[in-house]
Amino acid sequence: MAHPLNSSNPVAYNDRKVRIIIAVIAAFFVSSYGGNQTIFKLLLTVGFYIEFLVSFLFTILIVETIAFVTRRLDRHYDWSVRPIPRTLLQVLFGILLPSILEFLLAALYFALSGYNVLKTTFVDYAFPLIVMMIILFNAYYFIFYIIVKWKHVKEYTVQNEDGSVMLSQFAEGESKETILVNKGIKTFPVPISQVAYFFRNQEDESNYLRTFDREDFFLNLSLEDIQMLLDEKNFFRVNRQMIVNYAACKHYELMEYGKLRLEVIPDFDRPIVISQIKAKTYKEWYDR
């Protein structure tokens, strides 16, 4: 099994609030930049708020596009594994594509208002600012990636007295007794024995653990990394989205084509399906 430090597992960004804040700030700058009026006078005009609303809708679309592209590229073209193709694809789909999309949306907006976008101040003022913001947002994700990976490496390494670095004992296969979780600005350990299951949230594509008391906590680790820290006797990777504790397995039901539907405690909000390929292994693990 590959070591977590050398894995190309995607980073869990969990930055939906950050994206909304960035969209609001960017829309404000785009709406107010390049004009002759002061900010105070602009805030007193109805036209400013209409332009701000349109700019926000365009910006949130662009921001979500960049976030979507970045997450998809993280899965298939990790920066640390395939840096050259990742750079080219990030520039193409993370910068050029959103820039073109923004220009086309602006052209459509001006056309509906009876203007030619090429004859407005958008090309001279707003569009260069938007492109710069797109580049900065891509840079934000790259810096985020570097910080997360650095913390990941630091978590799994220890320093000897002579200054040399070696893998920690948990990276060598020994199961952990606790796992660090994040809640707000706080980071604290949760006993592994209290974890019912680990799962990927489909909405924000981040990983969480759920305790037997039905408390959910965000994890800045991939499920692959988490799996390497767990005792295989007590935890089973039922599918790509979930790792379950033996004590959380209530029962399973037979499905078509040899698949299984698993019921867990506490209840999960989506059906938990075990593929035909994993069904036999799961039954053997479950039968003690």
Image: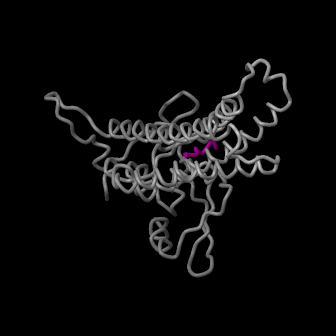
Q: Looking at the rendering, in which quadrant would you find the N terminus?
A: bottom left
Q: Position of residue 210 (x, y in %)?
A: 58, 46
**Viewer-proximal residue among 169 and 98:** 98
Which residue is at the front of the view, 91 or 15? 91
- 264 shown above or below 26: below
Residue 162 as seen in the image, left or right of residue 140 = left
Q: Name the residue: 61% across, 54% down.
A: 202
Residue 209 falls within the magenta-colored stretch = yes
**x, y percent for residue 92:** 48, 54
Residue at the spot 62% in from the left edge and 39% down from the top edge: 19
Q: Residue furthest bottom?
A: 257
Looking at the image, the residue that sits furthest to the right is 46
Up the image or down, 72 lies above or below 213; here it is below
22 versus 77 height, above or below: above
- The residue at the point 42 percent across, 52 percent down is 9
Residue at the farthest front position: 119
User: Which stretch is magenta?
Assistant: 208-215
Query: In the rendered view, does 283 fall on the left or right side of 157?
Result: right
Looking at this view, is 272 or 74 the one in front? 74
Residue most toward the left? 162
Which quadrant of the structure image shows residue 214? top right
Number of marks: 0
Query: Residue at coordinates 49% horizontally, 31% vertically from top-left?
Result: 188
Residue 157 covered by magenta stretch: no
Color style of the picture: one colour
